[in-house]
Image (cartoon, rainbow, N blue to C red):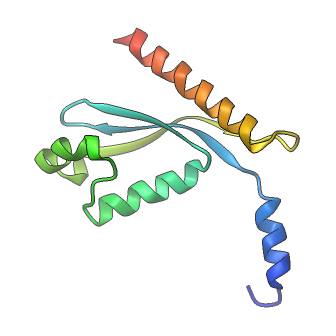
Amino acid sequence: MEGQTKKELQTQYKNRTVVGGVYCIKCNESGRVWLKSARDILGQRNKFEFFTSTNSCPEPGMRPDWEQYGAASFSFSVLEEISKKETQTDREFNEDLKLLLELWMEKLHDEE
């Protein structure tokens, strides 16, 4: 951070490539899965790793499995990533993520 002004850092942050997507958290013992979408897929992975390292449950719906099987029985996997286009608004990107999540829910439902 030395040598860079606050304004330069803000500009870099605003110009970064935003990568979102659909991810799955799975309890490997029970087989239950939770599908989610996020605007920042890397941030969600980091958040999950933090929760598991502190043995804190990331979702209320996971709590029974979390308490029964423990944090080590959960895994995080990215199912699909998409990058926000330069011309895309935040709203459009969020709509794309919502649609992508719906497609993955249908796909996984069809595989059952």
Q: Where is residue 16 in the image (x, y as percent from the top left)?
A: 77, 58
- In the rendered image, the residue lying farthest to the bottom is 2
Q: Within the image, what quadrant is residue 111 found in?
A: top left
Q: Position of residue 39 (x, y in %)?
A: 62, 46
Count of numbered tags: 0
Instruction: Tell me what residue is drawn at x 50 percent, y 52 percent.
Output: 44
The answer to whether residue 43 is above or below residue 87 is below
Q: Within the image, what quadrant is residue 103 found in?
A: top right
The answer to whether residue 11 is above or below residue 85 is below
Instruction: Tell me what residue is drawn at x 47 percent, y 37 percent.
Output: 36
Instruction: Tell me what residue is drawn at x 48 percent, y 52 percent.
Output: 45
What is the quadrant of the N terminus in the image?
bottom right
Q: Which of 80 and 8 is in front in this view?
A: 8
Q: Which of 92 and 106 is in front in this view?
A: 92
Q: Within the image, what quadrant is residue 93 found in?
A: top right
Q: Position of residue 61 (x, y in %)?
A: 27, 40
What is the quadrant of the C terminus in the image?
top left
